[in-house]
Amino acid sequence: MNITAELAASKHVSGATKPSLTGGIKVSVCYNRDHIKAVEITNTRPFAVTRLFTGKPVDRVLAMMPSLFYICGMGQLIAALRAVESASGMTESLATRQARDTLLFAESVREQVFSWVTNWAPQHKSRMSHVVDWFNQCRKQLGWSLTLAHTSLGEASKRVEIEPLARQLEGVIQPLLPAHQGFAPLPVMGVSEAVCQLLKECGEYPLGLAAKTLNFGDQQQCIAVLSALDGANAEQFCHQPSVSGVPAETGCWARQNMAASGFVIESRLRSLYREITTAPARLRALAKFTEGSASENIGVRGCSIVETARGSLLHKVTLDEKKRVERYQIIAPTEWNFHPQGSLKTKLEGLYIPWEQVTPVAETLIKLLDPCVDWQLELVHA
């Protein structure tokens, strides 16, 4: 299967002759004398790729997911499975639901630990392989759940043994996160000395307000987003989503229901730390989960929302009578968090800051928002 060839051949995709499967984020910061005059965020992710799904049978579309989405590929596949099952009137068994939720959780832990050791505690990079091995073990044990509900052989008789996975996870993350609480001093949490100094310097500047937090559990927010997906500008909306025209932020900070009235750099880092340190306990809680899946709770046929490391991921699909895709829509966390008018812009634009501090502060904020694609920072003097 050559997805790149399909992209290149598609008449809907214009521009580069060698299309990127992932694209990237470009942040341009315009500096004028003593302050940041403007912030421009350009997202080059290939949003038209979902047009390739049109007219294809669902098994073909599901097979394309791993090739299209390397980062958070598990989340993308499970969101797709649930959206297709919802559109087809299928229902997950409890075992399948728990297995998929465990795999979603395992991928989120892997991604969050990767972000932690890459950006904030690089002295622990050598231990990342243990987290990857643990995730691969989860995948090996629970991969049977990654097919459509009606094709999962013997799924009703499967059992999801979460406790052994939780114990193994405890052994994996303990050396990475020496403090058990997210309110311990940063050095005790394992943050490197260089990063502690950087965060201290960044925290001295009065950053602007952050965007509101995204919460699909709020009925009004959910209705506003789903209504926009049915509108005339739905494709553009997937590119730059908002809640009733207002940008929103998703991710671990939003999940912890912290006030969105400001952006304290250290509090953002601690929210990531807390999610990782509490991961074994939260994994054990999945064993007691008996409620419906996200797609069932939404009550919209063909729609699925799952939580990933970086926030809420939405898939929405419409099928024809032959179970082929008529329309497919995806909104990933990066589209929320790097909206052109979102948190990064509102926190930086208008900030009075010395020129030599613009790069470290901007880079720190980008890393905390954690895009799922490569990013580039460009500084321009006005």
Image (tube, rainbow, N blue to C red):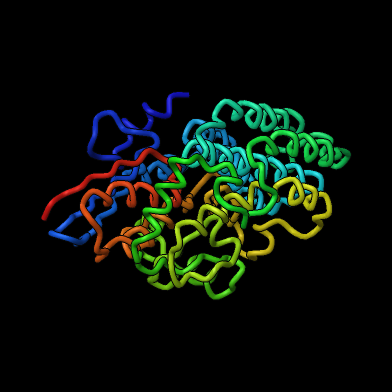
Tell me if I can see residue 253 in this picture.
yes
Residue sitting at x 54%, y 41%? 116
Which residue is at the front of the view, 90 or 324? 90
Q: Residue 144: give x, y in percent of width and height.
A: 74, 33
Q: Residue 92: give x, y in percent of width and height.
A: 75, 49
Residue sitting at x 39%, y 37%? 22
Does 36 sit above or below residue 134? Answer: below
Q: Quadrant of residue 244?
A: bottom left
Does 41 sit above or below residue 146? Answer: below
Residue sitting at x 38%, y 71%? 245
Which residue is at the front of the view, 47 or 37? 37
Residue lying furthest bottom in this view? 220
Q: Residue 128: give x, y in percent of width and height.
A: 59, 30
Q: Is residue 230 left or right of residue 185?
A: left
Q: Residue 131: give x, y in percent of width and height.
A: 65, 32
Residue lying furthest left in this view? 382
Q: In this view, does 233 lie to the left or right of 302?
A: left
Does 247 sit above or below residue 236? Answer: below
Residue lying furthest right in this view? 157
Task: Classify the position of the C terminus by image quarter.
Answer: bottom left
Q: Is residue 164 left or right of residue 329?
A: right
Which residue is at the front of the view, 181 or 229? 181
The number of numbered discs placed on residues in the rendered structure image is: 0
Tell me if I can see residue 317 in this picture.
no
Residue sitting at x 34%, y 62%? 205
